[in-house]
Amino acid sequence: MNRMMLVAGSLLALTGCAGNVDAPGAGGTDDADGFETAPGPLRAGDVIAYAAETSHPYAGGWKQAITSPGATFVRVHFNDFSLAKGDYVTVSSPDGAQSFRYEDRGPNGDGDVWAFAIDGETAIVELHSRTGGGHGFSIADIGHGTLALAPDPVTSGEATPHSVSLERRPGGGTPDIVCATEGREAIACHDLNAQQRPVARLSFVRDGGMYVCTGWLIAGKNRNTLITNNHCISTQTEATSVEARFGYQYMDCLRSTMATDQRFAGSTLLKTNSRTRTRSRGGLDYTLIQLSGDPQTTWGVLTPTTKAPSVGNLINFIQHPGGRPKEIGFWRDDAHTLRCQIDAIDQTYSGTLSGSQIGYSCDSEGGSSGSPIIDAGTGRAFGLHHLANVAWFSCRNGGTEMSAICADAGDLISCVNN
């Protein structure tokens, strides 16, 4: 499906990014005066007030339907969550198809719990207790979804959902704008299990809104370390609101059957480096957090490398564009004749650390921020996606070279040199 090429300075400023037909700049460089966008995470909903609570202490069970009319999903936010030993709370869909369990003082032990998302406008909250005696909890606000996070069906040969040029979504969401033709596919179209399993869709709360980005488990000193962009997550409060959803993808290339996924809560903020460089700090746009539980055992890790990318390196760009099930940027066109590749190296895009950036031609979208840029030859991650439209009259994307992140993060991540 053909797309009209966009002019820099107009709709390009709105996109979460896309690019697929560019030739490398002279010598593998981009125009130093090129223009790029860091649109921020894709807005998926709003945080709205809600009032409900158990008695304190509670005497027994408690149940309530939390309904937010018109919501595409609901996330319940518990405050002062503290249950007696053996008691637990479930947050479920009305039909019971989705159900999540919370105990004690929640996954981070601090009584502040953002429950995982329930599709639709109603979540059933139930306290299961035999004898009572715990403090209970209150619900002061909830997440009201405005972006559909459930998978949309796709017909083979068509553009992916939301890939046409749309008006800016209410609340600051950015539409997908694909230049020329759509090259992305369901991840199941390629046998890249070790590369794709550590990649998760992130849902989180910031600045009164619900947002989505991409993140991935990275080899490091602390087990269950996840990396994403600073412009997605930059504070401890945002980190503890994270829902990391692994295995959210189709099992087949035709996108007919969904795989079984697994969700983990965000925990400790380990380190962050800002999108924009100020004096001698920042400009790498990354954040490292630790997840609760043990996702690493099941989903594995990607290994970062300090190996310098070169122009023409083929890449695999694994992502959750628009918050949808996992996709891959492998081809730059729907005819599958042009591979995604590195087009520029050692760049300095606006506000970034000097010489720390790579440019590449490959479709992406709001929600793709934080995705790994993987060397197709080695399976190592040598870039972290974060920018769009980094060259004039181009839909080229930009990422931070992992060599720069490795140097800044120190022993928090385990980098190799091949």
Image (tube, rainbow, N blue to C red):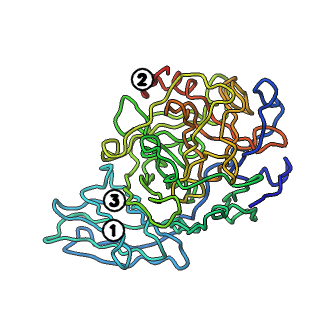
Asked if the residue at tag 3 contacts the one at tag 2, i.e. Cβ–Cβ closer than 8 Å, the answer is no
The percent position of residue 175, horizontal first and vertical second, equals: 70, 59
Q: Which residue is mark 1?
A: 99
Q: Which mark is residue 80?
A: 3
Q: Which residue is mark 2?
A: 411
Crowd tier of the residue under label 3, counting other residues whose Cα lies within 10 Å: few below 14, some 14–19, many 20 or above: some
Left or right of 53 in this view: 70: right
The amino acid marked with disc number 2 is: Asp
- Left or right: residue 315 versus residue 265 is right
Amino acid under disc 3: Asp
Mark before the other along the chain sequence, 2 or 1:
1
State the CA–CA distance, disc 2 to disc 1: 37 Å
Seen in the picture, residue 365 relative to 116 is either above or below; the reply is: above
CA gap between label 2 and label 3 equals: 35 Å
Question: Counting residues from the N terminus, which is met first, the one under dot 1 or under dot 3?
Answer: 3
Q: Residue at x 70, y 34 (%)?
A: 359
Looking at the image, which is closer to me, 296 or 187? 187
Return the disc, 2 or 3, that comes first in the chain's sequence.
Answer: 3
Residue 385 relative to residue 235: left or right: right
Secondary structure of the residue carrying tag 2 is helix
**Residue closer to the observer: 325 or 236:** 325
Nearer the observer, disc 1 or disc 3? 1
Cα distance in 3D space between marks 1 and 3: 21 Å
Q: Are marks 1 and 3 in contact (CB under 8 Å)?
A: no
Callout 3: SS: strand
Q: In the rendered structure, are the residues bearing label 2 and label 1 in contact, judged by CB atoms less than 8 Å apart?
A: no
